[in-house]
Amino acid sequence: MKWSKIVGLILAAGAFFGCKKNITIEDLRKFAATESYPTDNYLDTVKSKRALIIVAHDDDDCAMAGTLAKLKSQGWTIKQLSLQKHKGRDTLKHPSEIISNGNELILEDGLYRLGMDTAAHSAYPLPYSEIDLQFFTDKVADKLIEKISLFKPSVIFTLDDIKGGYGHPDHVFISKLVLSLATKKLIPCHRIYQSVYTPHMENEIVYNWLDKQLKEWNYPNLSPLANQIYGVKGMPEPSTQINISKYAQTKMKYLLAYDDDVRKNIRKFIPYYEEFEAKTYFEIFDREFFRVISF
């Protein structure tokens, strides 16, 4: 190996580990939930262990990946349905196979939104009335009814239907649609688990830490804009929590399985996860939170 290449590798490693040394455990603790909610017991009692993850983009389930890893280890059959999917670092496998039985696109042609390929700011929050106009609701609903009825899940996992995490219209659209279909009893489902942050986590991660980064990049923080549009203070508050510390290795493996284009987005909402070992990181972020809706 040439000396210049060795020097380059040393400098690259030094840059990485130098960054790591600057991030302390205490830095992480300020992002972790300070609140407590009732521990979920329902999932341990379900006899038909079948679950669907229904999201707009395949990486949208990152904040619930520990719970999904737990269920998979307990013998659940889990499938991920998404409107879009990305490449993983392992080109032979999709990342979803780590925490489920794999990904399936909801639509074969992938066309679910008007002007999706030409929209300059497709992630900008939209009023619910605009979402109804921009998305092919009937087309997606028909496919969801078909796929969900065939799979027959006991539980469905989505993002919240109020602001979809931070206001992305794709998130809001698919979560609202799934909830509507379940409420109208057009799909089989006993409960929907909507992945959410606690108020403290949302404040520290989304409104403070992420906001500072976005300002440096000259990009707006969409979450406060979504609050304004939807007349809310943030994500819906959790109704339950699940301890996922035993599944730290699997969750970290999932987070790291996407290629860098996806991981750079995950970094915005799961701070510094690449800088720590799984056990250390998920001893601090040892719980996942959900708003549960029963039918």
Image (cartoon, grey):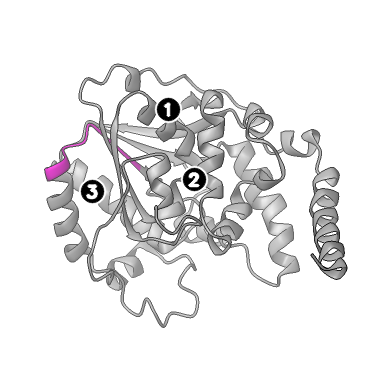
**Segment colored magenta:** 150-157
Looking at the image, which residue is at 62% across and 62% down?
221
Image location of residue 186, percent across then percent down: 12, 45
Out of 22 and 258, give the one closest to the viewer. 258
Of the numbered discs 1 and 3, the one sitting upstream in the chain is 1
The image quarter containing residue 285 is: top right
Image location of residue 34, percent across then percent down: 65, 28
Density class for disc 1 (Cα within 10 Å; few <14, some 14-19, many ≥20) is many
Out of 157 and 235, give the one closest to the viewer. 157
Observer-side mark, 1 or 2, equals 1
Density class for disc 2 (Cα within 10 Å; few <14, some 14-19, many ≥20) is some
Density class for disc 3 (Cα within 10 Å; few <14, some 14-19, many ≥20) is some
Q: Does 155 appear in magenta?
A: yes
**Cβ atoms under marks 1 and 2 closer than 8 Å:** no
Q: CA distance from mark 1 to mark 2?
A: 14 Å
Q: Identify the residue under disc 3.
A: 180
| Visible residue check, residue 110 | yes
Observer-side mark, 2 or 3, equals 2
**Secondary structure under the numbered disc 3 in the rendered image:** helix
Amino acid carrying label 1: it is Lys
**Secondary structure under the numbered disc 1 in the rendered image:** helix
Amino acid carrying label 3: it is Ser
| Visible residue check, residue 224 | no
Q: Identify the residue under disc 1.
A: 70
Q: Identify the residue under disc 2.
A: 62
**Secondary structure under the numbered disc 2 in the rendered image:** helix
Out of 55 and 291, give the one closest to the viewer. 55
Amino acid carrying label 2: it is Cys
